[in-house]
Structures are given as C-alpha cells and as structure tokens.
Amino acid sequence: VFFLDFDGTLAPIVDRPESATLLEGARSLLIRLAGRTLVCVLSGRDLDDLRARVDIPSLYYGADHGRRLVGPSGSGLEHEVGGSARSDLRSAAADLEERLADVGGVLVEVKDLSLSVHYRLVAEDERATVERIVHRAMEHRPTLRLNHGKLVFELKPDDGWDKGQAMLWLLERMHVALTDVCPICIGDDITDEDMFRALGPDGIPVVVGPPDRPTYARYSLSDPAETLRFLETFAPACSPGETSS
C-alpha cells in the first residue's frame, strides 16, 4: 500500500502553491497503482484543491495533513478530525492577514482544517518578522499547534492528529494490519516524518530530498522525478486497449 505526499513528492516545489502540478506521467502511473492496491495521497492541501490537482477518483485522499480523509468514488468513506478548531483557525487567518499585509511576498493560505503561511518569496531580512508575527498570533489560541515546514509555517488543531495517525486509522478502517502489508510512505517535508515514525520497524519510509537531513526514513529519493521512476517499478503495464488517462 502507498501513502504519498503531493508537493515535493509527486509535484515539484514551486514558488506559489497554486502553480503546483503533477509531474508528467504521474496521473497514469497512479491510476495503474490504484488498480492493484491502496494508494492514498496525504497532503497539507485543502481537500477540494488536492482532489482537483490529482483528479483520480480511485485514490484515497488525506487533506489538511490527514484531517479530512475520503475514499474512492462510491466508497462512502469520510472521516474528519479537529473540526472544533475551525473558528480559531479562521480567527488566526484574519489576524495574520492583517499583521502581514505589509510584508512583500508572504502568502496566507487558508484551508478547511489548517492554515499555512508561506514565506518562500519573502526577502531574507524580513523572514524573522514573519516568524515573530506568526508566533504572536498563536499566543492566545491554545487549541492550535504551530509546525515549521519548507519555508512555511503550518497552524493546525493541537489534538495529536497527524499524517501518521491518519495512515494508521485508514489501515485499521480497511481491516489491514501493518504486519500483513508493506506500507511504502514517501514524502519530502517535516510533516511526513510523522508518517515515517508511525511505521516503526514496518514498511518502507522514503524521504525525498537530501539523505543527510535528520529523518525517520531509512531510504531516500532525490526528487519527484526519481520518485516516479521508483513507483513505476510497482505499476503494472496497461493492457492493450486500456486507457490510463
């Protein structure tokens, strides 16, 4: 079974999140994989945005870092965690948008059950200001937790749920034990470490990017292109007359 991140794993990292697209060939490859086993895309993106960018009805999706889980079309599988924090997330978003309005290049991305502050395009000498403002916005919101990602701050409900918990929940829901399958978890960001850690000695945790960073992963791939080449080894070829688009 496969648990795959989106940005930096199936799609190259770009300056603005709305510009991200699957690598060429990724969609047909994922369709072939999903034809033989469970494939879940676990991402920090909003559910509607994630499904629109991947656009494969036969996959499982875990949006907002696994807080909104849905199954393939017609499965009826839906699960949500952290809904009680929505009002604090909306309040924090309004606060941050106001405080960061004068900082060039910053992007406050408001999602359903999480919030991202992207500063990839912010000048180096202003990034400390962004960090101070983000921490100030957290001061009186004990229901929220702050995580750091790749040039992004992530605000999420502080309830212990993460990508690793989402993976374990989905496997349990599907009546699949870790000892019965080989989960292959691939991701590039800090939030993917929760997924790697949840595997323990089971499965194959793979980090995308430099292998010398601190990580729970035991294997590494250099970039999304190499990720696709690795996944291709598991995908059956389409039979004559079968479409993969």
Image: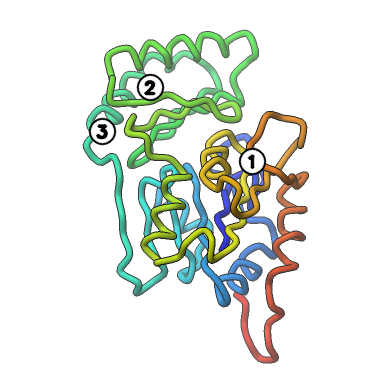
Which residue occupies 57% across, 49% down? 6
Q: Which residue is mark 2?
A: 97
Which residue occupies 62% across, 56% down? 184
Could you give the CA–CA distance between mark 1 and mark 3, rounded to whole angstroms?
Answer: 27 Å
Is the residue marked by circle 3 packed among few (<14), some (14-19), or many (20+) residues within 10 Å? many
Q: Which residue is mark 1?
A: 188
Which residue occupies 46% across, 29% down? 154
* 44 sits to left or right of 183: left
**Image height of 157 relative to 125, above or below:** below
The amino acid marked with disc number 3 is Ala
In the rendering, at what x and y percent does residue 163 appear? Answer: 47, 44
Q: Which mark is residue 85?
A: 3
The amino acid marked with disc number 2 is Glu
Could you give the CA–CA distance between mark 2 and mark 3, rounded to whole angstroms?
Answer: 18 Å
**Image height of 175 relative to 69, above or below:** below
Residue 13, by quadrant, is top right
Which is in the foreground here, disc 1 or disc 2?
1
Label 2 vs 3, first from the N-terminus: 3
Is the residue marked by circle 2 packed among few (<14), some (14-19), or many (20+) residues within 10 Å? some
**Split into 4 quadrants, where in the image is the C terminus?**
bottom right
**Image height of 57 relative to 192, above or below:** below
Scheme of image coloration: rainbow
Which residue occupies 49% across, 66% down? 59
In the rendering, at what x and y percent does residue 223 appear? Answer: 74, 46
* 2 sits to left or right of 116: right
